[in-house]
Amino acid sequence: MSEKLVVAYGDIYQDWQLGAGDGTQPTNPIRAKLATEILRQHLGEAINVIDPLGEVNQTEVRADVIAALKSIHDSDYIDRTLAGNCSQWVGTKPAVAEAGLAMFAGTMRATEMILNGETKVAFNPQGAKHHAQKASAEGFCAFNDMVWAALEFQRGGLKPLYLDFDIHAGDGVYHMLKNTGVPTISIHNGAVYPWDSEMQAGSGKRAEFHHPESHAYNFNVAMGDGDDAFIWAMDAAALIIDSYQPDVILLAAGADGHTGSSRLGQTNNYTEVGFRYAAEVVAKLAIQHADGRVLIGGAGGYQPLKETPETWALVVETIFNTVVGRNTVAGREAVAGRVNHVALVGEAN
């Protein structure tokens, strides 16, 4: 079973309709379905798509998920949100709340399967809701699944490390894990939401902004930066990951830095070259330090019909193929050593 990629996906994810509920809100969940379909097509029998709430005893599973939510979030906040009342959607939306619960459950199941040795690489396309805070929803995120996963890995005797290359800083994860000893690394635009003074230097330029005492590391890219900045940050992040030698890597694989028009506007110009490079670095580090264990959440991505699902599939497939040693060019390059970033940047130009 560990030779299969686990993907946590259920059609209930499609009820995550924020805003007016007509699919026009930037987080259109069709992206999760499309990414899952691409991975099915590419991997065939090497993929195991699991129902986030399981096939039986869903009432019991739901109770377990609520308990997990309340282990990291304020209880009153969870009760209000599950009743359908949240600042991130319009009106009372219990169906949206149930979709959010299922999305959190998907990361729970993926985490448990990694801990049990049933898989090495798992992906939840509607996971990594990295802006959610302890007592509030922020940035389209209600429940912070990666915080729960990191703490669950820690309880299971592993050393987790969280890496985030969404174009928006992983502020909720950072603040909720600040005093736990779990390292957090965030590669993000320094001049856009969430405007966090502990994560964004505010210079508008590429910058490193670290808090080693809190095991927190931030790489700010500039507005419009492309693959060269992404590769610069990934190379520097790799040195930090090498120093921590984690037993499992948690990755928020945001696709919202992809070049082109998106529903939040264009802020950066990453391409498939940069995303593939980042995935190869993660895979190589996972092989070196974590016996190949990687938990991946989709995080942001606002080109839902093409660029976002294609980017997620590229990142996940590259990591999985490399970790399990499938005969791919990406896998051979990553195992042999980090690819030459100068050549990669040349390809992107």
Image (cartoon, rainbow, N blue to C red):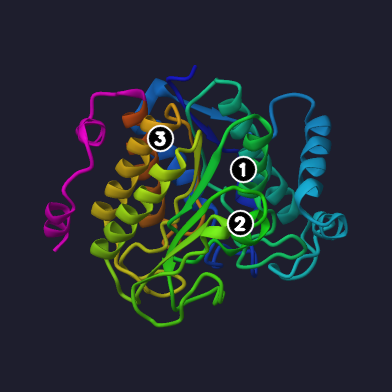
Type of the residue with mark 1: Ala
Q: Main secondary structure of the magenta part?
A: helix
* Inter-mark Cα distance, 3 to 1: 15 Å
Which badge, 3 or 1, comes first in the chain's sequence?
1
Q: Earlier in the sequence, mark 3 or mark 2?
A: 2
Q: Report the residue at 61% width, 43% height from top.
A: 150
Residue drawn at 81 percent across, 48 percent down: 70
In this rendered view, identify the residue nearer to me: 212 or 93.
Answer: 212
Report the residue marked by disc 2. 173
Q: Is residue 100 left or right of residue 127?
A: right
- Would residue 12 be seen by someone viewing this image from the given angle? no
Examine the rendered structure and indicate whether residue 120 appears above or below residue 285.
above
Mark 3–mark 2 Cα distance, whole angstroms, equals 20 Å
The vertical placement of 228 against 58, above or below, is below
Q: Amino acid at mark 2?
A: Val
Q: Residue 199 placed where, x, y %?
A: 52, 69
For image coordinates 70% across by 67% down, the residue present is 89
The residue identified by callout 3 is 286
User: How many other residues sit within 10 Å of disc 2, few (<14), some (14-19) or many (≥20)?
Assistant: many
Q: Which residues are magenta?
A: 324-349
Do callouts 3 and 1 mark residues in contact (Cβ within 8 Å)? no
| Callout 1 crowding tier (Cα within 10 Å): few <14, some 14–19, many ≥20 | many
Q: Is residue 346 magenta?
A: yes
Residue at position x 38%, y 64% from top? 257
Residue 55 falls in which quadrant of the image?
A: top right
- Other-residue count near label 3 (Cα within 10 Å), few / some / many at <14 / 14–19 / ≥20: many
